[in-house]
Amino acid sequence: MPEPAERTLGVAIPIPDPYGLQLQRSRESFGDPLARSIPTHVTLVPPLRVPAAAMGEIERHLTEVAADERPFPILLRGTGTFRPISPVVFVSLAIGISECEHLELRVRRGPLDRELNFPYHPHVTVAHHLSDDLLDRAFKELSEYEAEFPVWGFSLYEHGLDGVWRPRREFAFGAGLSD
């Protein structure tokens, strides 16, 4: 099978298990049809179509970004929404916002430079494009949710022809730092 001329990529901080699995199951329980297709994450670069020939340059860029970064904690706490602008309910970050903002600015340069439709707001989507009743249920049921974990790096994801997002490569922080 020939190599596709373009690929759809995203860059995100994966939410580790058991938290990622908990939130994915919650998303599924709200009836979100994308629950099994999208690993639980904090987006750094939203879906972006790129030429397949740019993959080497993209991976080198992400390696350089990760090399200069250090691990940081994320504390997820409670829920938020982008309604009425966008039908999304999410779990909020209480700790790690500024680190995610910094990382997003560094990652979304060079071969991944792009205009955003909305200002960057780190979050974990738990319900998207559902009825108002289901969005309200998601908002309420996860309003007390809390999880804390260290961020070790980020992942490059690729959107498959089957509609599933899969990690293509991980980029650990600190490879370029010395003690």
Image (spheres, rainbow, N blue to C red):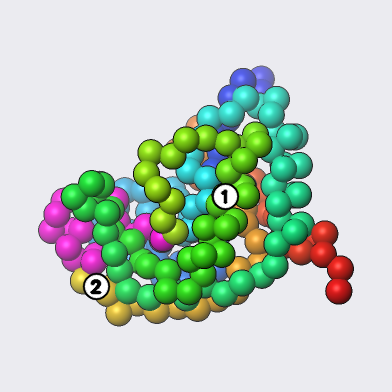
* Residue 37, position as x, y percentages in the image: 44, 48
- Vertical position of residue 76 compared to residue 106: above or below: below
Marks 2/1: CA distance? 32 Å
Asked if marks 2 and 1 touch (Cβ < 8 Å), the reply is no
Give the image location of residue 28, x and y in percent.
32, 59
Position of the C terminus, as image quadrant, is bottom right
Q: Which residues are magenta?
A: 123-139
Element class at badge 2: helix
Q: Give the residue displayed 62% in from the left and 25% down from the top.
A: 51
Q: Nearer the viewer, residue 26 or 49?
A: 49
Vertical comparison of 113 with 103: above or below: above
Amino acid bearing label 2: Glu
Please name the residue that numbered disc 2 is placed on. 141
**Relative to 9, residue 64 above or below:** below
User: Badge 2 local density, few (<14 within 10 Å), some, or many (20+)?
Assistant: some
Left or right? Give the position of 5 relative to 146.
right
- Mark 1, residue position: 105
The amino acid sitting under disc 1 is: Leu
